[in-house]
Amino acid sequence: MLRTLLALGAISALPATALAQSEPSSAYVQIDTCPSYQLEGEPVWESACPGYENWSVFFRASEHGSGISYAFNGSERTDFYRPPAQLLFGNFHNTMEWRMDVEGVYATIHRYVSEGPNMDVDPSEPDGERPMQRQDLLLVTALNPDNYQTVACPVYVVDASRISDANNAARLLADTFLPGYVCDGREPYVFTGMDEIYATVEAAHMMQEDQAQAQPPKSKP
């Protein structure tokens, strides 16, 4: 229950209509042929990729992981964000999912894959003999092109290594909470179980129904 209440904290940034949108759909953008360059004096590479319509996506990759940033129609790009992966090496998948409705694009869903040796084995064993592990995370990012200072922000992380239907779970979160979402600088919330996602979404709809019932009746014409 406590984790559900914490997850619901993001709803305070939503307009009343954000939980009620219909017929969402997806567009998929490939990001595997983007121009890249190395930062001067650093073992870090940056890539600039075209996103959906007027969106641009940037990646900053180092030896142990990668971060993502957004810009809209020439705006300042957002700060780079690296998902909370638990293994040493990580990178984003080459396909991005963009969620939209009749009002436009409101979220992205992007898989982050991290890999590395199992650190729980005997530390005296050579690294080459340690079994490799993999962790998949889905990063759910809100898009807010009307706010040029923060056009996008990460809101949820879905642990796809623990949740078997993680893609649909990420879509459910994006479609329920992110249309009209206002970025406020909070850290993304990590979901590790489908039951918690269902509980959070159900609680959000109950809150919306309570708010609607609390509205005073309209005056007669």
Image (cartoon, helix red, strand yellow):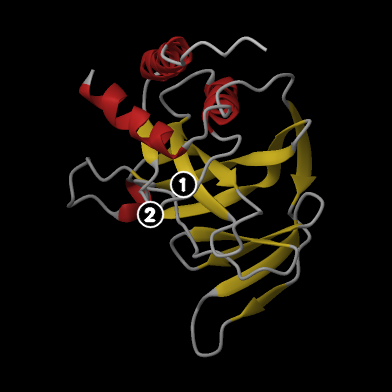
Place of residue 179 in the rendered image (x, y in percent of width and height, measured from the top left): 61, 34
- Residue 101 at what x, y percent from top left? 74, 30
Residue visible at 63% across and 41% down in the picture = 108
Q: Nearer the viewer, residue 68 or 206?
A: 206
Residue 114 badge: 1
**Residue found at x 66% / y 78%:** 37
**Which residue position holds label 2?**
88
> Where residue 91 sits in the image (x, y, percent)?
54, 53
Q: As drawn, is 97 to the left or to the right of 92?
A: right
Residue ranking furthest to the right: 53
User: In the structure shown, which secondary structural element does the residue marked by tag 2 occupy?
Assistant: loop
14 relative to 213, above or below: below
Task: State whether residue 40 is above or below residue 181.
Answer: below
Residue at x 79% of width, y 57% of height:
54
Q: Determine contact: label 1, label 2, CB under 8 Å.
A: yes
- Considering only vertical position in the picture, is 78 above or below 95? below
Give the x, y percent position of residue 13: 44, 40
Q: Residues within 10 Å of mark 2 (few under 14, many from 20)?
A: some
Image quarter hosting the N terminus: top left
Mark 1 burial class by Cα count in 10 Å: few <14, some 14-19, many 20+:
many
N-terminal of the two: label 1 or label 2? 2
Q: Is residue 136 left or right of residue 58?
A: left
Q: Amino acid at mark 1?
A: Ser
When asked about the image quadrant of residue 127, the answer is bottom left
Q: Residue at x 70, y 19 (%)?
A: 22
Q: What kind of element bears circle 1?
A: strand
**Of residues 132 and 37, the one drawn nearer to the viewer in this rendering:** 37
Is residue 167 among the parts visible in the rendering? yes
Residue 23, located in which quarter of the rendered image?
top right
**What is the spatial separation of the Cα atoms under label 1 and label 2, in whole angstroms?**
7 Å
Q: Is residue 178 left or right of residue 188?
A: right
The amino acid marked with disc number 2 is: Leu
